[in-house]
Amino acid sequence: MTEEAISQDQFEHLFNAAPSFAVRSPGRINLIGEHIDYCGGLVMPMAIAHSTQGWYRFNGTSQVRIYTTRFETLTTFNPHDVMQPPKGTWEDYVQGILNLGAHRQAGCGFDLWVTSDLHAGGLSSSASFLGLLALVNHHALTGERIELSDVSQRLTLALLCQQVENQFVGVPSGIMDPASVLLGGLMTLDCRTLKFQRLQAIPETHRLVIMDTGVPRTLAASGYAQRVAEVGAIQTLIADNDSTNKTTRYSELATLPDDRVTQALSLLESDPLKIRARHIFSEQARVLQSALALENNDMGALGRLMNESHHSLSVDYDVSCPELDLITQLSRDSGLGLGARMTGAGFGGCAISLVPVEHLEAHEAWVTNAYLQQTGIEPVLLASEVAAGADIIAL
């Protein structure tokens, strides 16, 4: 029996009815452009095959019942209880979608069974879960499934997911993750305007390999919030010292014009603000250079840019950790990968490496053995391919 059939059987056993729909929401890696999404920068996310999966049916009541295999918990939600405060648990993501997604109609409840293979940090499991919830909730309220081609509605849902994380869950995240899981594919995304451009996939001669360090991102939430606060401080200093236009507020730091970058860095005399800004400006340039490398099918250049990105994230932005630094260095030292960098918020979780297909097995064996020997942790390496955006299928 397939995993899908097992999941449907478990749904039927739990809810005493068969599911009517299946839904899948991908995870994502960020090929390059880390920690500049909340600065209004240009980023390069890629949806991946690893995903959050769900099966659901409309239950004819106003209640929403959700079972998650991750926590082995069945929870019932009342969408009309808009005064329900956050609890600091996974339920906040559901309650936030119901509250901010204006789930007010009677009789629009649903039963949902959720599982996921996004077990490693840095693959945007929270945005994947939110994207799934947003699609299912919209379907329950309107009776309509949003097509993959309906970019406008999908971006609207992405903004809702970001709002839930920012205002209900309490994480000051950017728009990149929900936009990536709902739109799918490999793209450049302007986080200020939401304009995006589809990119050609990594050529079949190469793969992006996800390297899970096995280290949980225990400091990611607090560290992430601290970096967002530092960006705000940088923006304020630059704007307050703008002698040409006192009314200008550089609220989108990554889009600072080139002729103002040098001046901006000169204003930031003290670390860590100066080196934080240095990462933001250099990372933005690397996204543009990486897009050109992809267009020219220059995987060597793309690998070098990935290496530069990790160094900047580790040294200037200080969001790496010893294990991320080690596993990326091992990938380089193997001589089998073209470049490696952390992906996601950092402080643990995953890195990615660009590896020629003919070297995949040797690269995995070399990195796994060396990392295990030095840390006592056996990493998980997975070759990834680009995936479509979150979608619903009628059963």
Image (cartoon, helix red, strand yellow):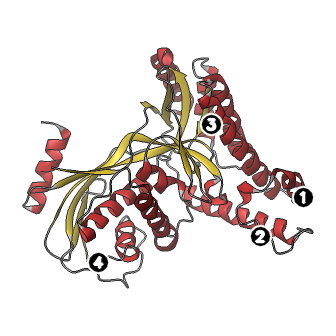
Q: Amino acid at mark 2?
A: Arg
Residue at x 45%, y 41% (from the top left corner): 185
Q: Please tell me the numbered disc located at residue 358.
A: none
* Cβ atoms under marks 2 and 1 closer than 8 Å: no
Q: Residue 351 placed where, x, y %? A: 55, 38
Dot 3: what SS? helix
Q: Is residue 267 visible?
A: yes
Residue that carries the numbered disc 2 in the rendered image: 249
Pick whichever of labels 2 and 1 is earlier in the sequence: 2
User: Which mark, residue 291?
Assistant: 3
Residue to which mark 1 is pinned? 269
Nearer the observer, disc 3 or disc 1? 3
Quarter of the image where one finds residue 292: top right
Tell me if label 3 and label 2 are in contact, CB under 8 Å. no
Q: Residue at horizontal 17%, vertical 47%?
A: 7
Q: Position of residue 279 (x, y in %)?
A: 74, 48
On the image, numbered disc 4 is attached to which residue?
A: 79
Residue at the limit of the structure toward the bottom, as seen here: 83
> The residue tagged with tag 1: helix, strand or loop?
loop
Spatial CA distance of label 3 from label 1 is 32 Å
Query: Which is in the foreground here, disc 4 or disc 1?
Result: 4
Marked residue nearer the N-terminal end (3 or 2): 2
How crowded is the residue under tag 3: few (<14 C-alpha within 10 Å), some, or many (20+)? some
User: Residue 118 lies in what quarter of the image?
Assistant: top left
Q: Residues within 10 Å of mark 1 (few under 14, many from 20)?
A: few
Tell me residue 166's x, y (percent).
Answer: 52, 69
